[in-house]
Image (cartoon, coloured by chain):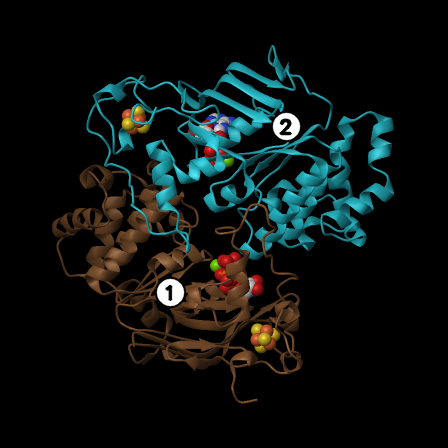
Amino acid sequence: MVLVLKDLCVDFTGMRGKVRALNNVSLSIEKGEVLGVVGESGSGKSVTALSILGLLGSNANISNGEISYSGQNLLTLGPKEMQSLRGKKIGMVFQEPMTALHPTMKVGNQLAEVIKRHRSVSKRQACKLAIEALKEVHIHDPELVAKKYPFELSGGMRQRIVIALAMSAPPDLLIADEPTTALDVTIQKEILQLIKELNDRRGTSVLLITHDLGVVSNVCDRVMVMYAGEVVEEGITEAVLNAPSHPYTEALLHALPDLADPGEPLKAIPGEVPDLQNRPAGCAFASRCPKAMDICGVSAPALELVSTNRSAACWLRRDTH
Amino acid sequence: MNTLIDFHSVDKSFHKGKQSVRAVVDANLTVKKGSVVGLVGESGSGKSTLGKMLIGLEMPSEGSIHFEGTPLWKKKKFMRPRPGDIQTVFQDPQSSLDPRMRVKEIILEPLLALGSRERKEKGGRERLTSLMKRVGLKAEHLDRYPHEFSGGQRQRIAIARALITDPSFIVLDEPTSALDVSVQAQVLNLLKELKNERNLTYLFISHNMSVIRYMCDVIAVMYKGRIVESGPARELFESPRHPYTKILLSSLPSIFREKGPVLSFAPPSEMETGEEACGFFDRCPFRMEACLKAPAFEAITEEHGVACYREG
Ligand SMILES: Nc1ncnc2c1ncn2[C@@H]1O[C@H](COP(=O)(O)OP(=O)(O)OP(=O)(O)O)[C@@H](O)[C@H]1O
Ligand SMILES: Nc1ncnc2c1ncn2[C@@H]1O[C@H](COP(=O)(O)OP(=O)(O)OP(=O)(O)O)[C@@H](O)[C@H]1O
Ligand code: SF4
Ligand code: SF4
Ligand SMILES: [Mg+2]
Ligand SMILES: [Mg+2]
């Protein structure tokens, strides 16, 4: 396993008190695997990514659980060691490429600098490798683009450069948090293809965060569905999307307009996400779940294996009661 | 169905110093009363600019726009039809609602354009409360501020604000793009119900093709300021004609889409192209010599038109 999270709990302390953003989150990624993380806004996707990267702010507290990377416990590493791990072993790509780029430095130089940091090469060699890296992310005319500043490039081009930067070490794991959300669909497709291609060719594992189930279905081997800071279902992408085990996954799929008959209303999920500050006693989805039973309001179901290759956190999927 | 809106050869250019951007180029489009017309296209293709010319925020540089048969713009002046008859809902409910105003003030604001009698009539307490209920909010929400609401609720506030004047036409510019799937479904359902109840007409701008398919009767596809294809929604989805429409549809990351033939952009052309070339030449997988002179927009059927030599 490249990455394993076990029962991770993250709390934020804010003006209104303590908020549990992640509640017993567990996941694992194998070498060469693409794991998709889906869920609505606020469900904890980014906090999961930031926890792994050691980038949670000072108001965050990991109150429980483990994060291990290639067998190494990341929670015991100091800030220096974490920093060297980021970039070198774990690459990252975020939604807004500008946040990862130096605004007043030519992109070729930015790449060369990072390459020099990771490998012991001369400046000239680094510049050559930078051009190679641009070619690898399918930038036409890399020599010309290398001389440009980020603001001179389109959003899609910038995201390609960020991916080139993230892959330059090259890392064993790439964490991409909504890498295509800000881009046009046609460009989104190209960027996703690029990520998939790098994954295929180099065997890089990928944690791909998105709120788009279509994106998941196109590029992810496995998918994990989050709701209110918890993992509610996890399994092989096709299987989960074709036959969801958890009522929330099912509701999410049915709410999509993709297959809906324009003459019929969409199947919206009634109600709202619970307030994370006042987490309900039982299942977090109970107030909106069409299949809720008595036990659901009293006791929270844990994420458990419900069949080969599939986990779900739902009382309906337990044979033991 | 009668024509409500008619764009005729509409151009819009923006000038910045010596540079000029042609945001909308020679746009022809009719919107029938009671229909939903969808506008799709990549970022910067001119969708919002087209919508803004209907609400008086941008003035056409060339051409004419008629609303119920009368020109919307006369000598650089926006000829407001009946005040409040055309309303809008924008994408980002966070920034389109003034954070310092209470919900009640936000919703009543469009009435300021109306005469005092109509203002009183339409802004009455009872009407306001029933409107709040209709969009799925509560009367006690009226005294709160926007930041106290979720994204979906804020979009409901924006919808109530658009409806307060009792419009016949609404420009919806990416109304659900900032919302989660489950909330999006609630808002789309609401918009559809309201349309049927009140016989509204919508111009629906979105980059989400699944949303467009579900919501619209007619779709217009824009590329670099031009409408390159328009037609009945079903027909456009089942047999797209313009290469860009085809690429757009084959890019959809839908779970349910049968994995049909994938069409992609061609690498940028090395050929020198002038102003008069087809706007899609540089990325078109089917380009040929003839395309160096742009094709006209031509009808294939009464309702379906396209601007491309290959498919005309
Ligand atoms: N720095 C922070 N301080 C306080 N609370 C935070 C902080 N970062 C995140 N949270 C809270 O943690 C929860 C999970 O947030 P997170 O950013 O992981 O959501 P997400 O699933 O990535 O959503 P989105 O799709 O909107 O990006 C939210 O309730 C959020 O308000
Ligand atoms: N006020 C303005 N001044 C200068 N240029 C403008 C102005 N408004 C729009 N433009 C330009 O006109 C073109 C069309 O913009 P528009 O906002 O209509 O695109 P859009 O299709 O709505 O894109 P998006 O999907 O990103 O919202 C763009 O090149 C844009 O930069
Ligand atoms: S545990 Fe109960 S409330 Fe929760 S998803 Fe399952 S059936 Fe629904
Ligand atoms: S006219 Fe030519 S270049 Fe333009 S879209 Fe058609 S085939 Fe492509
Ligand atoms: Mg996030
Ligand atoms: Mg726009």
Crowding near pointer 2: few (<14 within 10 Å), some, many (20+)? some
Q: With A225 as the anchor, is B83 left or right in this view?
A: right
Give the distance between the C-alpha atoms of the residues marked 1 and 2, in whole angstroms: 43 Å
| Frontmost residue, A153 versus B117 | B117
Q: With B38 as the anchor, is A173 left or right in this view?
A: left
| Frontmost residue, A256 versus B14 | A256
Q: With B217 as the anchor, is B284 left or right in this view?
A: left
Image point 20% across, 41% down: which residue? A142
Which residue, as the protein is rendered here, is positioned at the far front? B301
Q: Which quadrant does the N terminus of chain A fall into?
A: bottom left
Across and down, in percent, residue A190 comes to 31, 47
**Disc assigned to residue B126:** none
| Residue B102 in sight | no
User: Which quarter is ligand 4 in?
Assistant: top left
Contact (Cβ within 8 Å) of mark 1 with mark 2: no
Quadrant in which residue A65 is drawn: bottom left
Across and down, in percent, residue B139 comes to 80, 51
Q: Which residue is mark 2?
A: B33
The amino acid type found where label 1 is placed reads: Glu
Q: Which residue is mark 1?
A: A238
The amino acid type found where label 2 is placed reads: Lys
User: Which hue belongs to chain A?
Assistant: brown
Image point 44% across, 77% down: which residue? A311
Residue B242's place in the image compared with B151, above or below, is above
| Frontmost residue, A164 versus B226 | B226
Crowding near pointer 1: few (<14 within 10 Å), some, many (20+)? some
